[in-house]
Image: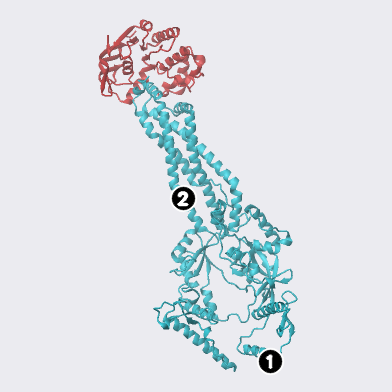
Amino acid sequence: MIRLRYAATLARTKLQSRKGSLFTTIAVSSILFSVLIAIIIVFTAVEKSTMSLVRAANNDQYLVKVSPVLPGGAVIGMNPVKLTANDIKLVRDYEADYYKNLKNKYTTAGLKYIEPDPSDSLLIPNAFADPATPSELRYRLNFNSSLMRGFEQSQLVAYSKTARNTFADLQKVVDSYHGSGYYNIGATPLPPIPNQLLIIDDKETFNDNTLKAGDMTLYGYSVNAIHNSSYEMQDQQLLSRYITYRDTSSLKGIPVLVTAQEAATLFGGRMGIASEPESDTAKQSWLKEVKQKLTGQTYQSCYRNQPEQQLLAKIQQDYANIESHKNDKDYKKPSLIYSYPSAPCGDIAVQSDTRDKIEKDAEAARISEEKKLGMYEAPSHRTITYQIVGFITAQPYSDATKDISSYFKNLLSYHADLMGAVIPEQMYQSLPDNLKFSPSQLANTNLGYTDATASLAPHIVAFPSIEQARAFISNEGCSSSDTDCKKLFHADPYGSNYLILDEVGKLFSKIMLYILPAVMILAGLIIWFMMSRVMSDNRKETAVYRAMGARRIDIAFIYLTYTLILSILTVFTSFLMGITTAYILNETYGKQLADTASLAFGVGDSGVARLSLFDVSSPMLLYAFGTILCLCLVAVIQPLIRNVLRPPIRDIRTE
Amino acid sequence: MDSSPIIELRHVSRTYTVGRERIAALRDMSLTINQGEIVAITGPSGSGKSTLLQLIGCLDQPTSGEIIIDGKAVQHLSDRALSQVRRATIGFIFQSFYLQPFLKLKDNIAVPAMFSSQEPDDIMNRVTDLLTQVGLSDRMDHFPRELSGGQIQRAAIARALMNQPAILLADEPTGNLDSSNSQAIVDLFKNIREKLGTTIIIVTHNPEIAAQTDRTIVLKDGVII
């Protein structure tokens, strides 16, 4: 057979002919392949770096938020507007027990028991009941009843005793999926607004004591968490990516992670921090500045218990009435008027007390009665100090269809089920007692209820792999938005959209399974067409070679060598174009998207992981490389066979 | 000079089918050409000159009859064996030369040897010898477009001699040349025959060229007249 060097010599001559057609073929095929290669490079980079962001955000674990499904919600097992005979009996038994105990308390304390108000009953007639419902069942639950909270608690306690979805049950299930850890979330140890008001510039914000909701989304609440005194405790392990102050020995107050947006709004002005910028790249610098200047920042709030809250409400009401009647000579001011505290979190002083003896005796009797029943709580207040130990970058919900950046941001952004600022549990536990918050003495002391809430509390469960997390979620849980869940647990990915991102990755692989052959076939047709033309044009030359003694295999080898040269040129051009395209995309959009992703994942500029659009490590590239070479060789087979089988005389004769 | 036959045609016919019509290009032709002969084949267009040349050159197979080249019957040989005969025994010179325009002259001359198992150094030595013989040694690194018509034809002759064939088949070798170049080519053929003993068959319309050969075979309607 002809030597390779001679085959190459003769093959190279074909590159000189039909240069325009050759250039077009290589260019068109290379563009098709380069698009494929660029997609592979970009997507591999995005997939890998996104998953490294996911791992960085979740401490190399895949987290699932799990909460037990409580049938019927707060009143477990009941449909509040369609009660069964058993439900009604249960409610009535509860009421009877409650009032019997209450009556005993009064009797024991030597107080006169007053019969309960019927309108405060847990059961009220259901005017909208199905007409076919028997009259003894035409009731619904009265959620305005003062007994309702206690009833709900008793229901939860009863449920917890037979429940199959307690924390202990969850642990058994998770073990079978090789879960690697559990984290506490959801505890709300501090009272919200208005019991706790922020002290800003040495003033309690009495005139700004309502809940702020912003845009009414979780984002709106989370960027007003300090104002709303909305705090949630979470295991510190879940928060490590946000924490910027780790020295627990020098804490000056309750450690808290707040949104960078609210921290900048409340405390950034005097530090020269501007409001949050629009672009994600500028936001990264802004976030860095916020972290530098506001880490360790302390602030205070004033906690006033419920009786003191009632005094404040009375002050507000009295002042409003006095103001509105200032020109009314017949208006009689209240006999007891308090004044606002003169110092932040100061005492509430009496401004004027013109009560007569009867009023004073009635007040004293009320206090005495409450004390005897163990229900009295004196007005009290205390200053609570917080120290900012980290920042969460809240991501507003954006219209994903607005532009590609919004779509990308929405895909990456994990909207944590978080309305408030977060207290790292372990940091909080390390505080000295004087810095901790002590709940009211009258706080719930029902140990059965405490145990029940603990056993049915939500948890974050960690899994070492996506597959295990996915299997657990799909087999054992329903989405938290599924109100008709028939399984034992609600389960959702936590901390990042890793399941969605993983699905997107798998979808890409599936799409590539179709795109790759389609592009290959198209490019193959182009190469086939071109090769057919080249061979057709070179028939006479082939016939001359045959006349000189070339065998069919020599001719085939020349054309295969030619095809190989062509395919190497195509591969080289394709990879050059594809890599260049991906590199340009990375240079043009990479930083912006990396900043967006870093913010979306809350890893900031920590450098642990960054989104990239350029990664050439995918084995698919090798596959593409080999496939292009093979494709060129395959595309030439048919015209080559046709060409070498053609008797040379046919082409010589046409001379 | 050895006068043993190198080419024998025995009752050879070649018929082509064009559409539904069968055209007899050669009819029951018998012919013997001895080694070292220079033979001219002439005749009007369509008389069967080129068909005869292609049959002798093993590019085509007879419809019937027997062709013996250098003592070997070739009409039933495989494609591979025919290639071997063409490579080892026959050198072709085409009217249109068919030099590869993107190969230097030395590579063009070497092409027939590329299909053989000759060593590259031997090939280059042979190329140098041949180009010297045809007076083109100073044009080795030139491309065909840089040569004159006469030089190109001499190069084509050199290429045909590359594998030292026993038979040289020339199809209208002077058809595109002026009379002085044509004469030079005829002189070259004679010189080749003198030095190498090569049998040369020339298809030509030119009676002056035919007159300078050992024998002229005139064809008409597929038969020798």
Tell me the quarter of the image containing the C terminus of chain A: top left
Instruction: Compare residues B201 and A342 and report the one nearer the observer.
Output: A342
Res B134 label: none
In the depicted structure, whether residue A454 falls above or below residue A652: below
Q: Mark 1 points at which residue?
A: A358
Kindly indicate the quadrant of the structure image that contains residue A309. bottom right
Colour red belongs to chain = B
Instruction: Compare residues B79 and A267 and report the one nearer the observer.
Output: A267
Seen at 44% across and 14% down, the residue is B153
Kindly indicate the quadrant of the structure image that contains residue A302. bottom right
- The chain that hosts pointer 2 is A
Seen at 41% across and 36% down, the residue is A635
Mark nearer the viewer, 1 or 2: 1
In the depicted structure, whether residue B137 falls above or below residue A537: above
Q: Mark 2 points at which residue?
A: A509
Colour cyan belongs to chain = A
